[in-house]
Image: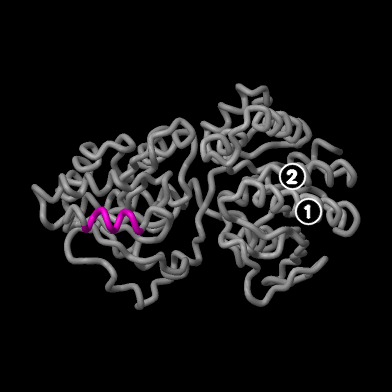
Amino acid sequence: MKILLLTQWFDPEPTFKGLLFAKTLQEKGHEVEVITGFPNYPDGKIYDGYRMRWLKREDLDGVRVNRVPLYPSHDGSALKRIFNYISFFFSATLFGIFFAKKPDIIYVYHPPLTVGLAGALIGLFRKTPFVCDIQDLWPDTLRATGMISSPSALKLVGRTCNWVYGRAAHIVVLSPGFKNILIRRGVSQDKLTVIYNWCDEPALGTFPESTMDLLPKGFNIVFAGNMGHAQALSTVLDAAEIVGKVETKLNFVLVGSGVQCDSLKQEAEDRNIQNVYFVPRIPMSEVGTILNSADALLVHLRKDQLFEITIPSKTQAYMAIGKPIIMAVGGDAAKLVTAADCGLCCESQNEKALAVEALKLKNLSLSELNNLGTNARTYYERKLSLNVGSDHFIALFNSLLLKQL
């Protein structure tokens, strides 16, 4: 197949379905062409080595990548973010209609919604089916994050979503919860498929020595990733304080950065919490080492209905590395951990429950901990891996093309 991969974010930017996905599709015998923007995420500044112009063609590990212009921005300004999305929409649509090779199928990575609009228009003009991979539910996320609060604007976004979904040949979602919501919104069940995300397996498989000694002595429960409002990590400080009163060899290690990082550090210092450690953000190529050195891994988000229908991306990375997990998120993510029998689950933003589960893990034998880790890795390899996920996409693409014959 000739596959057009349409995404606003692509390597070297951090992305879920980027170069790794494109290379895997090509390794399985398909031709991939990418339309994306000039790299500027997450800081909103064009990366070194790139200069904005009408078009830049690249060959990345054998994948043909076309970079089209956009307004670079990723700050708190809703207006600038809208310009960022709309500028890519116009550039990608024009290039996809008039300059890209005619594909057999178009794969669209959503968010933002404007990429779905571009895919719909390119598909319409090129008479090509497009598959929309929904990673973020709009307008729900816009409302929850406060990016858009106007009821009329949110209603317009919702109508646009419905139009894109109606035009799509098929829709892929990352969790059963997403699927159920779209069915309630009128999308046909036959048009929806759950394909779980995978993780950056090559990056997690390398263990540089530079990160070998970052963890303290004792039983270490590691959280790795963004420290923002959505993660509600003050609950972890509360749980650590509770744990510290009964167990001195259990530590919570928070790895990464984010808007709440400095305030969390200050809070831990002010409260003299001795069993919480902070490790600065490290390159993705080194994350595998620190995860592999942990005794258990933590997922935590604030209590919110929107988060209960998603599966945080770190879940797959944690499972692939083969460590026991504490899942402090309800809904689909907790069901996944339960199905894999790879850890313990507790309620979000419940410090007492988190403390109890942490102590339970600490008190397990080494063989019991190893069994949970083995279960995690086995489930990932059988159900969630890049190889499994890409095969699902290829089978879906083939079935859509057969329907056209």
Q: Which residue lies at the image location 61% right of the left edge and 61% below the top edge?
A: 44
Query: Residue 86 placed where, x, y %?
Result: 74, 49
Q: Secondary structure at mark 1?
A: loop
Is 227 on the left-hand or right-hand side of 31?
Answer: left
Against 228, residue 286 (above or below) is below
In the picture, residue 117 is in which quadrant?
top right
| Residue type at the position of mark 1 | Met
- Residue at 17 percent across and 50 percent down: it is 362
Residue 289 at x, y percent in the picture: 36, 68
Under circle 2, the secondary element is: helix
Alpha carbon distance from label 2 to label 1: 8 Å
**Magenta segment, principal secondary structure?**
helix
Asked if residue 340 is positioned above or below residue 321 in the image, the reply reads: above
Q: Which residues are magenta?
A: 262-269
- The amino acid type, in three-letter code, at marker 2 is Asn
* Pointer 2 or 1: first along the chain: 1
Task: Check residue 326 for magenta coloring.
Answer: no
Q: In which quadrant of the rendered view does residue 265 lie?
A: bottom left
Against 207, is 298 above or below? above
User: Which image quadrant: the C terminus?
Assistant: top right
Residue 398 got which mark?
2
In the displayed structure image, the side of residue 205 where residue 111 appears, left or right: right
Q: Contact (CB < 8 A) between labels 2 and 1?
A: yes
Residue named by callout 1: 1
Count how many numbered circles sit on residues in the image.
2
* Label 2 Cα neighbours within 10 Å, binned few <14 / some 14-19 / many ≥20: some
